[in-house]
Amino acid sequence: MLICFLYMMTTNDFYQQLDRNKPLIQGLATKLVNDFDTARFLYHETAHQAIQNKNKLQQDTFEEWLMNTMNKVYLKWRQGIS
């Protein structure tokens, strides 16, 4: 029988991970749009969603989750301006 334990982050771990990944998601936002205000919006919305879901996030998939969420936020934003 295989038992798998998922490591759920503490609040402190979460904010350390978010801070550590800030340049990554800010960089992605900047690459997705060529506008500082829109890039800032994409970053803030992604960080906001991370905070809302912090109790569900795992440390080993945190960066991937941020990148996927940023892409979803971007696509939703694009649909809104079309």
Image (tube, grey):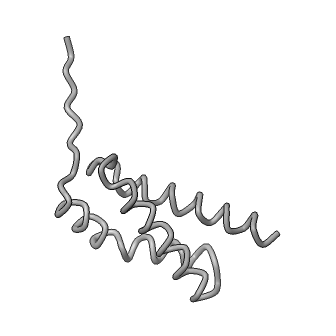
Q: How many marks?
A: 0
Outermost residue to the front: 52
Using residue 56 as the reference point, say whether residue 41 is left or right of it: right
Outermost residue to the bottom: 36
Outermost residue to the right: 82
In the image, residue 5 lies at what x, y percent?
A: 19, 32
In the image, residue 9 lies at what x, y percent?
A: 21, 51
Residue 10, by quadrant, is bottom left
- Name the residue rendered at 17%, 63% in the picture: 12
In the image, residue 52 lies at what x, y percent?
A: 39, 58
**Quadrant the C terminus occupies:** bottom right
- Name the residue rendered at 29%, 47% in the picture: 58
Note whether 22 is above or below 51 in the view shown.
below
- Name the residue rendered at 26%, 51% in the picture: 59
- Residue nearest the observer in this picture, 3 or 53: 53
Residue 33, by quadrant, is bottom right
Using residue 45 as the reference point, say whether residue 18 is left or right of it: left
- Name the residue rendered at 27%, 71% in the picture: 20
In the image, residue 50 lies at what x, y percent?
A: 40, 60
Note whether 37 is above or below 73 in the view shown.
below
**Quadrant the N terminus occupies:** top left
Note whether 26 is above or below 63 in the view shown.
below
Using residue 33 as the reference point, say whether residue 58 is left or right of it: left
